[in-house]
Amino acid sequence: MIQRMLIILVLILMGFGIIPLVWGLQDAETVSPVSQYYVSQGADDLGAANLVTAVVVSYRGLDTLGEVAVLFTATAGAAMLLGLGADNSKRKQQHQQASEKPGNHMAESEAQPKKQERREGSELLKTGAAFLFPLLLVFGVYIFIHGHLTPGGGFQGGVVIASGLVLLLLSESDRPMRKTLLHSIESLSGAAYAAVGLMGLWLAAGFLDPRFLPAGQFGSLFSAGAIPVIYSLIGLKVGSELTGVIDSLRRRSS
Amino acid sequence: MIVLIFVLGVLLITSAAAALYMKHIVSAIITSGVVSLVGSLFFLLAGAPDVAMTEAAIGSALTTVIFLFAWSRIRDEQDRQNAADQYQEKYQEQGQEQGQDTQGKQEQAQIAASPRPRINAAERAQKGGKA
Amino acid sequence: MTGDTGAMPQGTLLQNLTAGMHITQVMAVIGFILILLGLWGILTRKHIIRMIISFSILDSGIHLIMVGLGYTRNGTAPIFDGDLSITDALGRVVDPIPSALVLTAIVIGIAVTALMLSYAVRLYKAYRSLSIDDIKEMKW
């Protein structure tokens, strides 16, 4: 009870601390000085119509590389934690089997811990998933290829691809994931991302500088240097990583 | 416009509060997805369509899916452990009647002496299942 | 009729209705309320899954505040197309940097949520309970 009162007190104090921050808050008249440079020079600099993409991929490209690394670490951590769990339960089962040997002759089959059986996906779900999956794949690729022209980009496209794969996983729950394909897509796109960054260092002004490819015509698909290439690689990496997370969180039949 | 923003704000805050106090975990998970979905409408109003897309796709769709997968896995584990418990109790009774499993008893004693708290099935169902 | 609407400056209806209201302020207030709700949930709920849900609500609140701070008056999305030319962009677009940062934060948020959930699954396997009252070894 005292604990709860203390928590309420702390939150009320935080609320009172916040009020002066919010009180006179008004919409800004113009963007911040750094953004003023991005807005006025960004299109001439990089040739990307979508300024958010220009900031994510090029101006703050190092942040995005670090973020992809964080995503990879979290994915690996989740897979490791859940993989350890599978090992443990296997050992426990062996343990049980060893301990049940002496009482073998008794009638025990009805009390055996029974294997959880998975419900099969319905016909509607299977047909719908088979029909929608290629469309979702194409849509995801469309989103991340057009990241420099329209809202969207690698992250959104990757998530659309991952959600298509989730649909496939739901409809055919028994089909094992092709882990090697997934992992090779993930590591190849990650390595290619770093390699494109190094090519920027070598051929253009700096690391992750997309201007070593021709700028092209402003607003067309093949423009803005290497930005579409980098964003496509990010999309592939994010999509395969999120699919890996979901696959490792999926039910196990063991 | 003002009406729209007002309705959206009330919806956002009520669904956030409801997500904390829903009785069932699955309803709470779905309601927290609603919070993200309404939040993405706010991003759209604030002129950030990129963020709105990301929040709608990741925050409300994929996060909900991950929560539900994890929850179904926990439920699976619960069923399996309950079944194992029942089996073990039955076996223990039968073994004591016959009095011939010294090895089995030792293992039982080891498990009972282990530092991990072993909560019985009824209590666990109360705490873990609904709480 | 058409002449009237043509003579009016663009977006008049919208401007009149939102004259006294600042989107930044509205989003900041809602975001702070979400943050306080999320903190309340993290501190008082006993169920681990509910604590993770509270964390994701807190996350949404932070994102709302950050995007709200980047809003400029009557701003549009910073994407050049037929309606927005490069020369007159400076007074009309919202700040692209908070958008980019929040984009990153959302993706990291889902990765952290997945990590927390796999910890929850592991904890359930080890302690056979999801209530933090049953995990006594971590208390002092």
Image (cartoon, coloured by chain):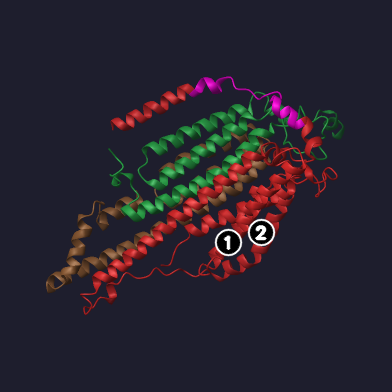
The residue indicated by pointer 1 is A167
Q: Is residue B37 above or below residue A114?
A: above
**Rendered image: mark on residue A136:** 2
Q: Which chain is green?
A: C
Q: Is residue A188 above or below residue A64?
A: below
Q: Quadrant of residue C18?
A: top right
| Residue ID at (21%, 59%) | B110
Chain where mark 2 sits: A
Disc 1 and disc 2: Cα gap in Å? Answer: 10 Å
| Circles 1, 2 touching at the beta carbon (< 8 Å) | yes
- Discs 1 and 2 share one subunit: yes
Give the left or right position of residue B35, taking residue B98 as reference: right
Q: Is residue C40 visible?
A: yes
Indicate the colour of chain B. Answer: brown
Indicate the colour of chain A. Answer: red
Name the residue nearer the viewer: A118 or C104: C104
Amino acid at pointer 1 = Leu
| Residue A92: image location, x then y, percent | 32, 64
Range covered by the magenta-colored residues = A18-39
Chain where mark 1 sits: A
